[in-house]
Image (spheres, grey):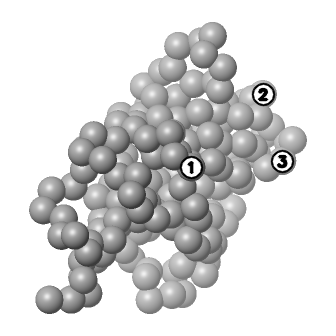
Amino acid sequence: MSTHTIRLAGPWEQGPKSTEQAPVRCQLPAFIPAGESTTLLARAFHRPTRLAADTQVNLVVTSCNSELELRLNEVMLPVVSKTTSAQHENSQDAGRVSAADPATDSEPADIYRLATGDSLRDFNRLTVILKRRSCETHVRAGLISVALEIVEPEA
């Protein structure tokens, strides 16, 4: 079994959950603005090429101090696994998707693995709603990285 990743660094659109304000373009990491408790991030991407019928595609998402809701093409994605950056670095997956980022202020990052299943299309739109875990707005909360993890079956 071979695994490789494609980073979805940007550009992303970041804006409030309401549609009253226009989103702004950004790169990851992206943080919930000071004084806000929620933000929405969205990005379009194409289906990776040359996927076999039995190839598994997951989203690997790293966030800090926030709860998140992910939708791929308007379908809520189930969380397959959740670890912290410390657990991740001690596992055999270490190095595949890096969670170490000074932007997290040394707080442990949460790493989510979500199965795309039948939701992956030729052209996709990923939407992430971030909710600050703490009401302390001085604590940074946000989305650190997002990657497609492509798991090819053994030949």
Give the quarter of the image for residue 52: bottom left
> Secondary structure beneath disc 3?
loop
Image location of residue 43, percent across then percent down: 40, 37
Choose mark 2 or mark 1, whichever is in front.
1
What whole-number distance in Å separates the C-alpha atoms at marks 2 and 1?
A: 27 Å
**Residue at (78, 39) in percent of width and height:** 138
What whole-number distance in Å separates the C-alpha atoms at marks 2 and 3?
A: 12 Å
> Secondary structure beneath disc 2?
loop
* Three-letter residue code for mark 2: Gly
- Seen in the picture, residue 65 relative to 113 is either above or below; the reply is above
On the rendered image, what quadrant is the N terminus found in? bottom left
Q: Are marks 2 and 1 in contact (CB under 8 Å)?
A: no
> Secondary structure beneath disc 1?
strand
Image location of residue 17, percent across then percent down: 65, 26
Decide: few, some or many residues near mark 2? Use Cα within 10 Å; few <14, some 14-19, many ≥20: few
Give the quarter of the image for residue 5: bottom left
Image location of residue 144, percent across then percent down: 52, 52
Left or right of residue 23: residue 116: left
**Residue at (52, 29) in percent of width and height:** 14
Left or right of residue 84: residue 124: left
Report which residue position mark 3 lands on.
134
**Residue at (54, 87) in percent of width and height:** 90
For the question of whether residue 85 can be seen, the reply is no
What whole-number distance in Å separates the C-alpha atoms at marks 1 and 3?
A: 24 Å
Report which residue position mark 2 lands on.
35
* Three-letter residue code for mark 1: Met
Return the mark for residue 76: 1
- Which sits earlier in the primary sequence, circle 2 or circle 1? 2
- Seen in the picture, residue 26 relative to 45 is either above or below; the reply is above
